[in-house]
Amino acid sequence: MFDAAEWEDYWRVGPVPAAMIYAAAEELGFPFPADFVELMSVHQGRIPPHGFVPVFEGPKTMFGPLMHFVKSRPGELAARRAILLRHGYPVRLVPFADAAGQCHWALDYRASAATPKISFVIPELGYDDEGAIVPVASSISELLTMLEDE
């Protein structure tokens, strides 16, 4: 599930020490789950080999590329979140992977500050719309088992 050889570079930033990810978690005010830290420390800025998840009926939803923790680079998680917050983004969400258009994947701390779920976010619907934030998995590990080909 975390085999680096199978993932494709997108942002070309390479692995990051777990300490940097934990520092970002502290800065954001949310504890990152261990499976998230493992995923991001190895695969930040990369796309998984099977990059689609069945979220809705019909076509599967794209997963990736993963954002990263390198400051002042495109795709940086904290900067992306700060921009989203200025546009009404829920404060208990932390984006971590892109999808098509403005849609993305997020750690969803709305139900629990300690154990986030994984949700698919559709900003175009407006964050007050009940269909804008779709819970998909209970953990990163579960989400990764759901990855499929298109």
Image (cartoon, rainbow, N blue to C red):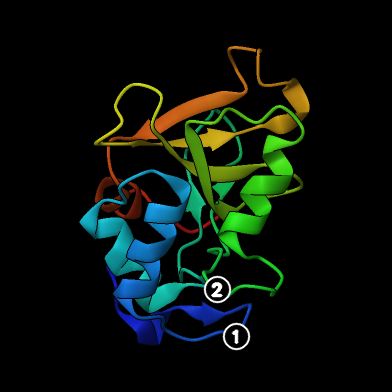
In depth, the one of 80 and 147 nearer the eye is 80
Residue 132: percent from left, percent from top: 62, 23
* Mark 2 nearby-residue class (10 Å; few <14, some 14–19, many ≥20): many
Residue drawn where x is 42% and y is 84% of the image: 15
Q: Quadrant of residue 67?
A: bottom right
Residue 74: percent from left, percent from top: 71, 70
User: How many numbered badges does the structure rendering display?
Assistant: 2
Left or right: residue 12 compared with residue 102: left
Mark identifier at residue 145: none
Residue type marked 1: Arg
Residue type marked 2: Gly
Residue drawn where x is 30% and y is 47% of the image: 31
Left or right: residue 11 compared with residue 68: right
Q: Quadrant of residue 41?
A: bottom left
Residue 44: percent from left, percent from top: 48, 72
In depth, the one of 49 and 149 nearer the eye is 49
Residue 110: percent from left, percent from top: 41, 24
* Mark 1 nearby-residue class (10 Å; few <14, some 14–19, many ≥20): few
State which quarter of the image contains the C terminus. bottom right
Q: Which residue is mark 1?
A: 12
User: Is there a contact, CB below 8 Å, between mark 1 and mark 2?
Assistant: yes
State which quarter of the image contains the N terminus. bottom left
Mark identifier at residue 45: 2
Dot 1 or dot 2, earlier in sequence: 1
Residue drawn where x is 28% and y is 43% of the image: 139
- Tell me the CA gap for discs 1 and 2: 6 Å
- Disc 2 on helix, strand or loop? loop
In depth, the one of 69 and 144 nearer the eye is 69
- Disc 1 on helix, strand or loop? loop
Residue drawn where x is 67% and y is 42% of the image: 103
Left or right: residue 114 compared with residue 97: left
